[in-house]
Amino acid sequence: MIYGIALGSNLGDRTDNLRRALKLIHESVPGAVIRAACIYETLPVDCAPGTQAFLNTAIELEADIQPHDLHAKLKSIESQLGRPTLHERNSPRTIDLDILHAGPLTIEDETLTVPHPRLHQRRFVLQPMADLNSSLQLPNQAKTIAELLAALEDDPNTVKAFPTPLPHLAALRERKRIGPKVAVLTAYDYPTARLLDEAGVDLILVGDSLGMVVHGLPDTTGVTMDMMVMHTAAVCRGVKRAPVIADLPFASYRTPEEALTNAHRLMDCGVAAVKLEGGAAHLPEIKAIIAAGIPFVGHIGMLPQSVKEEGGYKKKGKTADQITTLLADAKALDQAGACAMVLESIVAEVAAQITASVNAITIGIGAGSATNGQVLVTPDLIGSFPWFRPPFAKARADLASETLRAVQEYLSEVRLQ
């Protein structure tokens, strides 16, 4: 069953209240897949004068639980977070948790009414719902969420959207809807990460490409978890603003348990999300990561970690079978709750088709310009690895030549002293 749940808070540390509520929902509904919208600050509606502004968001929860059981768990979480069981209507609260919808079900009894009877009138509810699934049509409504939202008059009660979302990088879905496209670069060390962050890059990826461009390995299959942890920690120390994503390297996610253990190792470094290569074949590992509340980024198309078994780096999406598999993998990742997915070395038209078919943001590398963003290996961008550069990478600097010039100048100066 897929549920929509609204979260609101206007007492105490409102952001922390939302985060704690999300954590408790994870713990109370084992195995649930949760996708979170942006956080919106809104002026109170139908509340007493002087009431503090609310922070509101919504989540989509997928779990095998009955609506009334879920309702009871949400009321218990409200109590744990300090909301009195008996309270005046529209009174200030540390947390407010409401079931907005329960898939196709319509329920109306003394305990529960779903879909929520007033959600179509509330921008502070519809806006985060649109972040999650703007095409959703509820069983008691003739219009989609996007259409309900568009039908509302301008509402001065919506003050702003917070730039920092809940820890699922849900803001990426908004970038997919309204732009601009997302610019992603790799970093493997403190100074590069700090420079990228200060330059304003949207996301920083600690890619296992470090095996080749830092360690001189022939491919990424020699990268270990210890290597990834070391480089990821260095990158996170250099970043104050941009979310950092880190790769799970080859042979680090062979089972759900192994995937989760290693994902936690990367999260402990300070990353915002983890990434692994593969689609439907790795759903058990992906779902274990997401169910633990760890934001996840997928990676389909050409998979560098599979280079040995595939006999080289090959463009994907050239045959009907490949297209079918790519679309199935993308939809599987999307349904599992991936907040983004990298499309590597995929025929441009196929990458465009994938981008249009999923809610998650797509980040292309050698996959054309129709994706929602692009990622490059930074040494390819700045020309610091001259021995190989992929054909799709445009070097915008020539650090290799500048390094050679500076070193040779230094050598000449020293030797002539």
Image (spheres, rainbow, N blue to C red):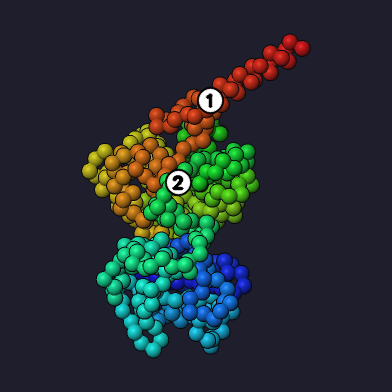
**Where residue 101 sits in the image (x, y, percent)?**
36, 74
Nearest to N terminus: mark 2 or mark 1: 2
Q: In this view, does 141 lie to the left or right of 416?
A: left
Picture layout, residue 323 above or below residue 133 = above
**Where residue 225 sits in the image (x, y, percent)?**
55, 46
Q: In which quarter of the image is the N terminus?
A: bottom left
Q: 8 or 379: which is nearer to us?
A: 8
Amino acid at the residue labelled 2? Val
Q: In this view, does 145 lie to the left or right of 12?
A: left
Task: Report whether residue 63 is seen.
Answer: no
**Where residue 247 sits in the image (x, y, percent)?**
50, 46
Residue found 60% across the figure and 20% down from its top = 404
Circle 2 — which element?
A: strand
Residue found 38% across the figure and 37% down from its top = 366
The answer to the question of whether label 2 and label 1 lie on touching residues, with beta carbons closer than 8 A, is no
Q: 171 or 244: which is nearer to us?
A: 171
Q: In this view, does 132 lie to the left or right of 249?
A: left
Picture layout, residue 133 above or below residue 29 = above
Quarter holding residue 148 = bottom left
Q: In this view, does 190 lie to the left or right of 76?
A: right
Q: Quadrant of the C terminus?
A: top right
The Cα–Cα distance between marks 2 and 1, rounded to whole angstroms, is 24 Å
Q: 395 or 45: which is nearer to us?
A: 45
Q: 118 or 87: which is nearer to us?
A: 118
Label 2 Cα neighbours within 10 Å, binned few <14 / some 14-19 / many ≥20: many
Circle 1 — which element?
A: loop
According to the image, label 2 marks what residue?
Answer: 182
Amino acid at the residue labelled 1? Asp
Label 1 Cα neighbours within 10 Å, binned few <14 / some 14-19 / many ≥20: some
